[in-house]
Amino acid sequence: MHAAIPYIIAALLCSVGVYGIMVRRNAVLLLMAVELILAAATLILVTADAVHGAAAPTGQVFALFVIVLAAAEIGVGLAIVLRWYRTFGSVDITEVDAQGGESSASDSDSGAADNTDPVATSSAQVML
Amino acid sequence: MTVADVLLVALGGLAVGAGLLVVSCAHVVRAGLWLVVALGALAGCFLVLSAEFVAWVQLLIYVGAVVVLLLFVTMLTRAPIGRSEELDRSRWPAALVGGATAITLVTLLVQAFGGVTVTLNGAAIGSAQRIGVAVFSGWVLGFELLSVILLAALIATIVVSRRMDSE
């Protein structure tokens, strides 16, 4: 087996994830792109283990660690996204600047008006 | 080209193609389902690389738990079910940065590992027994720290997503 093949696959997956992080506006889709980068890191570790790991499967142990850390990361990240959705009624990350936190929300009335829609927020709370 | 090479190219192409659809699909739910395909193909790559236990853990945790959680939050945040054009920002800067990342990483890794060939000997190298022995003999501290991190993440998730009384 050529060792370069899985390394190239991991590099391409990582760059796809970088593209996704830059292009997506929906916070949930952005977290999916982060998952792609973490999966690429796992592939790098497993490949390094197959190429160099003779005595002990250290690379595979670290791949397991990365998988567990990714699970923890996605849990906290999605909890933050949910909280954000309940507060602002949207998961669009480009609307953060228009919000600017609760203190400066009065500076941009046009941007804040459609996001803090009371109907959407209250119906979301009913649903949750 | 050995059988392992052919399998890796096929599964890796599937993973990268599905990953491209994850970041470019206009349906939110379909992007999550393409993520299942990408991560499943990656688990196949792990199997070819004789990392059997990691492959099954990948299927269980990523495809079984993480993607389900992502789809769950997609529904809770009321993402548009159908096709929506509002998902993406302008593509050119992102494509530029992504392409530059790809060129850099591929060049680096090909220069480092271009001529290296490996003979994969058997599935026993990544069996659950061997991984378990390695974890509980050499990496016990890391394992325990990871369990503490998981507990902290669990508590943080509950606290952050809980509805406050003041609202």
Image (spheres, coloured by chain):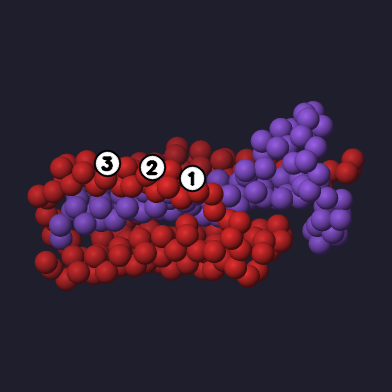
Chain colours: A purple, B red
Disc 3 marks which amino acid? Thr
CB contact under 8 Å: marks 3 and 1: no
Classify 10 Å Cα crowding around label 2: few (below 14), some (14-19), many (20 and above): some
- The residue carrying mark 1 is A22
Label 3: chain letter = B
In this rendering, position of residue A111 left or right of residue A10:
right
Label 2: chain letter = B
Label 1: chain letter = A
In this rendering, position of residue B86 left or right of residue B2:
right
Q: Position of residue A79 (x, y in %)?
A: 67, 48
Question: Can residue A128 be seen?
Answer: yes
Q: Nearer the viewer, residue A20 or B94?
A: B94
* Mark 2 or 3, nearer chain start: 2
From the viewer's perspective, is residue A76 above or below residue B14?
above
Helix, strand or loop under label 2: helix
Q: Quadrant of the N terminus of chain A?
A: bottom left
- The residue carrying mark 2 is B97
Helix, strand or loop under label 1: helix
Disc 2 marks which amino acid? Val
**Spatial CA span between label 2 and label 3:** 10 Å
Name the residue at 27% across, 41% down. Answer: B104
Question: Is circle 2 on the same chain as circle 3?
Answer: yes
Query: In this view, which residue lies farthest toward the front?
Result: A110
Question: Is circle 3 on the same chain as circle 1?
Answer: no
CB contact under 8 Å: marks 1 and 2: yes
Q: Nearer the viewer, residue B146 or A34?
A: A34
Which disc, if any, is residue B104?
3
Query: In this view, which residue lies farthest toward the right?
Result: B166
**Spatial CA span between label 3 and label 1:** 18 Å
Q: Position of residue A91 (x, y in %)?
A: 67, 50
Name the residue at 67% across, 39% down. Answer: A96
Q: Nearer the viewer, residue A36 or B2?
A: A36
